[in-house]
Image: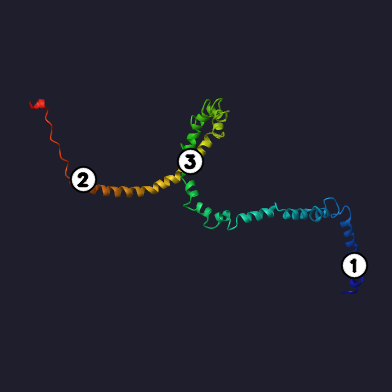
């Protein structure tokens, strides 16, 4: 380094320090990029300050009902020993349903049930066609109107002393059916006992049949009783 450079070095250091001081002063001034409204200081305070983004993020992560809690719940539901986990496992229910020969493919394939249902002249078109079943159901004085009309089926069901009230009333139809069920429960053991006795009855019939046959043969061998001589009418003899 030459002598001139050595002589100017203190001046250069002083100038650099002065420029740095002026720069820091400008940065720290109320109109500088740090302290001015919307400056770097405000943005840092929004991130690190009280109620800032980091605090909000920490509060969200600590909330049991937040994303972490939801992720834990989802992980628990999809565990290998849970129904959803078993369904999602390899070769599980979902794999079998979506297999090439599975129900989903057969349902959605060309000419399959869904294709036939939604095809032209299919069940859905016939249902929605003018004058079709849906039109007849919703037509004026159609089935729906008759059901909802005054004195119709709904009125009969819900009216006082109507079908529903009679069905559910104490001692009504439902109670009688329940009592009848109890009667059937009492009859079932007797029917079972009768069913168990039938083989014994068959055995007894077979034994009686075997005993009657020799008795019949013996009765055939016995001599018949003597017949009394016929008494002639005197008028006839004359």
Q: Which mark is residue 183?
A: 3
Against 16, residue 70 (above or below) is: above
Q: CA distance from mark 1 to mark 3?
A: 114 Å
State the quadrant of the C terminus. Answer: top left
Task: Tell me which residue sits at (43%, 45%) in the image.
Answer: 190
Q: Residues within 10 Å of mark 2 (few under 14, many from 20)?
A: few
User: 135 or 18: which is nearer to us?
Assistant: 135
- Label 1 packing within 10 angstroms: few (<14), some (14-19), many (20+): few
Task: Indicate which disc, 3 or 2, sits on the residue closer to the N terminus.
Answer: 3
The answer to whether one can see residue 111 in this image is no
On the picture, is 85 further left or further right than 3? left
Per the rendering, the mark at residue 219 is: 2
Question: Which residue occupies the extreme front position in the image?
Answer: 234
Is disc 2 placed on a helix, strand or loop?
A: helix
In this picture, residue 221 sits left or right of residue 141: left
As drawn, the residue found furthest toward the left would be: 238
Residue linked to disc 1:
13
Residue shown at 39% from the left, 47% from the top: 195
Residue 6, above or below 60: below
- Provide residue 107's location: percent of width, then percent of height: 48, 46
Q: Which mark is residue 89?
A: none
The residue mark sitting in front, 1 or 3, is: 3
Between the C-alphas of marks 3 and 2, the distance is 50 Å
Q: Residue at x 69, y 53 (%)?
A: 67
Report the front residue among 116 and 71: 71
Q: Nearer the viewer, mark 3 or mark 2?
A: 2
């Amino acid at each position: 380094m030459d002598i001139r450079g050595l002589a100017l070095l203190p001046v250069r250091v002083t100038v650099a320090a002065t420029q740095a001081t002026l720069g820091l002063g400008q940065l720290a001034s109320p109109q500088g990029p740090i302290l001015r409204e919307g400056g770097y200081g405000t943005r840092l305070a929004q991130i690190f300050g009280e109620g800032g983004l980091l605090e909000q993020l920490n509060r969200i992560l600590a909330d049991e009902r937040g994303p972490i809690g939801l992720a834990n719940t989802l992980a628990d539901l999809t565990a290998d020993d849970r129904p959803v986990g078993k369904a999602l496992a390899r070769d599980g229910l979902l794999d079998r349903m979506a297999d090439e020969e599975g129900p989903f493919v057969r349902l959605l394939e060309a000419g399959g049930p869904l294709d036939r249902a939604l095809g032209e002249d299919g069940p859905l078109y016939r249902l929605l066609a003018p004058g079709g079943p849906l039109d007849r159901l919703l037509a004026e004085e159609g089935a729906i109107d008759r059901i909802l009309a005054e004195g119709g089926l709904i009125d009969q069901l819900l009216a006082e002393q109507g079908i529903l009230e009679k069905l559910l009333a104490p001692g009504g139809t439902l109670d009688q059916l329940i009592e009848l069920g109890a009667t059937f429960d009492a009859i079932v053991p007797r029917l079972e006992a009768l069913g168990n006795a039938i083989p014994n009855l068959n055995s007894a019939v077979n034994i009686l049949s075997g005993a009657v046959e020799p008795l019949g043969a013996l009765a055939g061998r016995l001599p018949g009783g003597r017949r009394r001589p016929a008494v002639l009418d005197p008028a006839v003899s004359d």
